[in-house]
Amino acid sequence: MGTLYICATPIGNLEDASYRLIRILNEVDLIACEDTRRTQILLKHYQINKPTISYFQHNQRSREDVLLERLKRGESIALVSDAGVPGISDPGHLLIERAWNEGIGVEVIPGPSALISALVVSGLDTSSFVFEGFLPSRAGQRRKELQRLAQEERTIVLYESPRRLLSLLQDMLAVWGNRRVAVARELTKVHEEVKRGLISEVISYYEEFPPRGEITVVVEGYKKEGSPDLDQICKEVLQLMEQGVGKKEALSQKAREYSVKKSDLYNRILKM
């Protein structure tokens, strides 16, 4: 049996390719690509000369039989998407599942991810989050999904195309109200941009400056009426510390007072 390598590739800046990724791409017998033309840009940059085969949404079923047969013959295959980690809103998870079921070795080569990069740069709560990928393109179905997520308390991460971004934000405002949001665009690329603010503010910005490129949207989760404002509690913690109260004691005191997790306060203070 060969090995199927799930390879995370740069989401923009080619310098984000790891040494291990380059080594694996040089060693495998075949590279399965979402788009062979896109992958060739990376391969040429690192002078990697390996055969490629297309593996994308509309041919994945027929390609899987071919790839699995070659893996069973002892060949090793690298699975890559156009950018980021295969299987995350990209083809890959069906092939990976079948490889496991056939007893074929599967290894992951970790690396860049638009999902994680946008989440951590957003400045929103990262202690727990939910990833919903692309919401439906039709307005009615999209609003139905937004209604389903209306009381989701975790931070919500979405992918969206530039031509539908404004429609998505407008639907969010109508269904969820005016929450904090961060729109990360063209991450790691020359024109990288992270626009933060209330949903209404971000809508006004993109009405004036129409978006382009790859987009990830990060939105704060639902806050129950009367739930404590972590930012305000953190300010009170800092005030106690300025008055001479030790950090641990200040955190413990305010965590008890507002019935929140001390770790949540600590993480939010680090961001502040």
Image: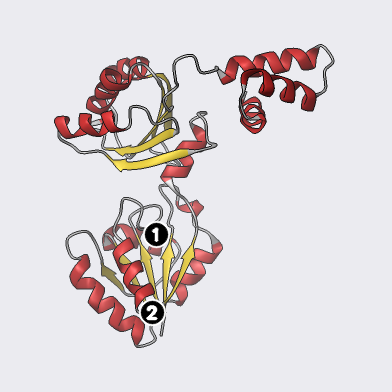
Q: Mark 1: few, some, or many residues within 10 Å (few <14, many ≥20)?
A: some
**Relative height, residue 192 to residue 200 (above, below):** below
Q: Is residue 41 visible?
A: yes
Residue 255, position in %: x, y? Answer: 67, 23
Q: Nearer the viewer, mark 2 or mark 1?
A: 2
Residue 238 as seen in the image, left or right of residue 147: right
Q: Quadrant of residue 169?
A: top left
Q: Is residue 192 visible?
A: no
Q: Quadrant of residue 32?
A: bottom left
Q: Earlier in the sequence, mark 2 or mark 1?
A: 2
Q: Which residue is mark 1?
A: 42
- Find numbered disc 2 in the image and state the secondary structure of the residue it sits on: loop
Looking at the image, what colour scheme do you see? secondary structure
Amino acid type at image mark 2: Asp
Q: Quadrant of residue 98?
A: bottom left
Which residue sits furthest bottom?
A: 73
Q: Which residue is mark 2?
A: 29
Numbered marks: total? 2
Residue 18 as seen in the image, left or right of residue 267: left
* The N terminus - image quarter: bottom left
Residue 157, position in %: x, y? Answer: 39, 37
Identified at 25% across, 34% down, the residue is 145
Identified at 50% across, 52% down, the residue is 16
The answer to which of 237 and 168 lies nearer the viewer is: 237
Q: Mark 2: few, some, or many residues within 10 Å (few <14, many ≥20)?
A: some
